[in-house]
Every structure is written in C-alpha cells, then in structure tokens.
Amino acid sequence: MIIDVKNIVKERKQKLKEKIEYLKKDGIIPKLVVIFASDDPASEIYVSKKRNMCKEIGIEEEEFLLDLNITTDKIISIINKLNEDSSIDGILVQLPLYKHLDENKILESINPDKDVDGLHPLNLGKLFSNKKGLVSCTPRGIMTILDELGINISGKNAVIVGRSVLVGKPIAHLLLNKGATITLCHTKTTNLKEHTIKADILVVAVGKAKIITADMVKEGSVVIDVGINRIEDKIIGDVDTENVKDIAKYITPVPGGVGLTTVLSLLENVTEVASNKLN
Ligand code: NAP
C-alpha cells in the first residue's frame, strides 16, 4: 500500500499552525534564516518549497542569497551575527554549497541551539548518545511517517541502505534508539539482497533509481524510499515502487513522500526552538 504522506503532512501542518498561533499570542514569532550559496538548480526548488511552507504556516523567513564571490569567512561572519540575534530561531545553510567553500567549517559555526538542520557535530553527538537535540530533517520526517502509521519499532529488523551523514547514519541512530536491530548497508556491502530481504523496516537513501527491486523486499515490510532521481522528465525513487507496493505492507511514494516530511520537520524544528523562549 502506498502511504498517503500528503495527508500526514496536512494534519501535522495544521497542528503546527495552531502551535504558532499560540506562540504569537505570547509575542513569539518563529523565524528561520536560509543561507543560499549554491548554483544547484534543485536546491533553488527546495528553498522555494521551504519559503512557501513557512509563509503558509506563519513562520517568518529570510534568505541570504550569496554569489560566487562569497568566502567561507564572510559566511561565518554572517552566521555569527545571526547566532547573536535573539529574534532568529533557526539557521539553515542550504547544501550543497559552492565547491570552494568549507562546508564543515561553516556548519560548525552555527549555534547548535539554532541548528535546525541538525548537522552540527554537537547535535549529531546527542543523537549518537540518545540525548535530546535538534534532529536533521529527513530522518525526523521518516520517524514522523512511522509514528503516524503506528509502527512499533522496538525489536524490528531495520535495514538502511546508504550511510550519509544527512540521511543514512542519523536514521540508523533514531531507529536504534527506538529499539530496532540495525543493519547499515553501503557500497562495500556484499550481497545487498541478503540484508534487505530480512528488513521489517527498509530505508533506502542511495540516489540510484530502482536499486531495490521486488525480490529484495520482505513480505509485509515497511519501505521508506528517500531517493530522488531525475530520469528524463520524471522524478523517481530508489525503489521499484510499482512491483514492491504489493509485497510491502507500506511504501512511501516518490515524489510526494519523504520530501514533504523533510520540509515539515524543518518547520517543526524552528517552532520547537522558538517554543523554548516560553520557558
Ligand atoms: P549520498 O551522500 O550520495 O549517499 C549515498 C549513499 O548510498 C552512500 O552511503 C553510498 O555508499 C550508498 N550507495 C551508493 N551506491 C550504492 C549501492 N550500489 N549499494 C549500496 N549502497 C550504495 O546521498 P544522500 O545525501 O544520503 O541522499 C541519498 C538520496 O536521497 C539521493 O537521491 C538524494 O537526492 C535523496 N535525498 C532525499 C531527501 C528528501 O527529502 N526526499 C533528502 C536528502 C536526500 P558509500 O558510503 O559506500 O559511498
């Protein structure tokens, strides 16, 4: 069955809107700043999606659109000012950056309490040690989907294909923290199918169209397809959805799946940071 992610997001967005209205009564307006230093056309689309959703639910959003002449030091000095500005709750550096920029140095300069993309080493460390911190958006969104489906994660075999810092590693830790037994696969994994076929929960974040075929999926499993692949004019995932959808109990669609919960999670993170001002 294909999961109705659009509906999940619609309901969560409504709850978030209500939370923001409540914050506004206390004079708190959540605010996100996006730093855009990239010539990646896909990133422009992602930023416009974030901008639109912010507007829709009442989060203030500001963008720094930086041209190719920008330096790492200049971006860090912008971030330092944003770190000190108490009206700003979240700082997001849209990746990938221009190639000449030092991504790690820039991400590490963000105040971890405003790191709504959850990529600062401190937040990654908190996730690793199962402590409360800001969780990166795509993995958080996947947990939202599992939560909305009422999936009991404890004791399940969770197989993750892809070990990036952005998706694979954090989702592995989130699932581990909920009691799943984790297998993390990557390019050095021999016989991928041997692992995926045992997955009660299969998360695929590779970036290769239809790398997961029906014979690799366990009957009755939950399949989360994170991949985004542009093939001719179409966007498809990493899973052969047409043939997997009757084997798996649930599968996320692409497009209209994890991408939607990623943006939602960003806004949830910004709102959570803003809510801390109530304490
Ligand atoms: P990434 O940094 O390129 O990582 C890809 C991972 O896949 C790597 O760990 C790589 O292994 C592994 N891999 C590549 N080929 C493989 C193979 N044949 N067998 C097993 N593992 C293989 O990518 P990413 O940032 O995690 O993104 C993955 C996909 O998700 C992309 O399509 C991206 O566009 C999409 N994405 C979607 C969202 C969303 O919101 N929907 C968000 C983020 C990313 P090695 O480590 O060994 O190289």
Image (tube, rainbow, N blue to C red):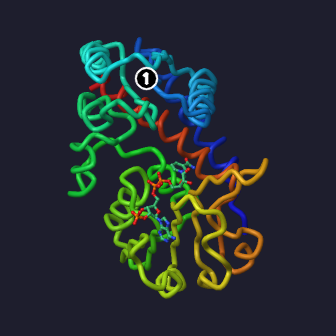
Picture coordinates of residue 168, whole percent (x, y): 42, 60
In-front residue for pair 251/38 = 38
Label 1 amino acid?
A: Ile
Q: Residue at x 50, y 18 (%)?
A: 61
Residue furthest to the bottom: 194
Closer-to-camera residue (189/273): 189
Residue name at image x 40 percent, y 30 percent: 93
Q: Measuring from the top left, give residue 215's x and y in whole percent.
A: 65, 85
> Does 42 sit above or below residue 64?
below
Placement of the C terminus among the 4 image quadrants:
top left
Q: Secondary structure at mark 1?
A: strand
Which residue corresponds to the image point at 69% horizontal and 47% vertical from the top-left?
6
**Residue under circle 1?**
35
- In the depicted structure, whether residue 83 falls above or below residue 177: above
Q: Is mark 1 within 8 Å of ligand 1?
A: no
Q: Quadrant of residue 39?
A: top right
Expressed as whole percent of the image width and height from the top left, the position of residue 204 reads: 53, 65
Total marks placed: 1
Residue 133 visible in the shown view: yes
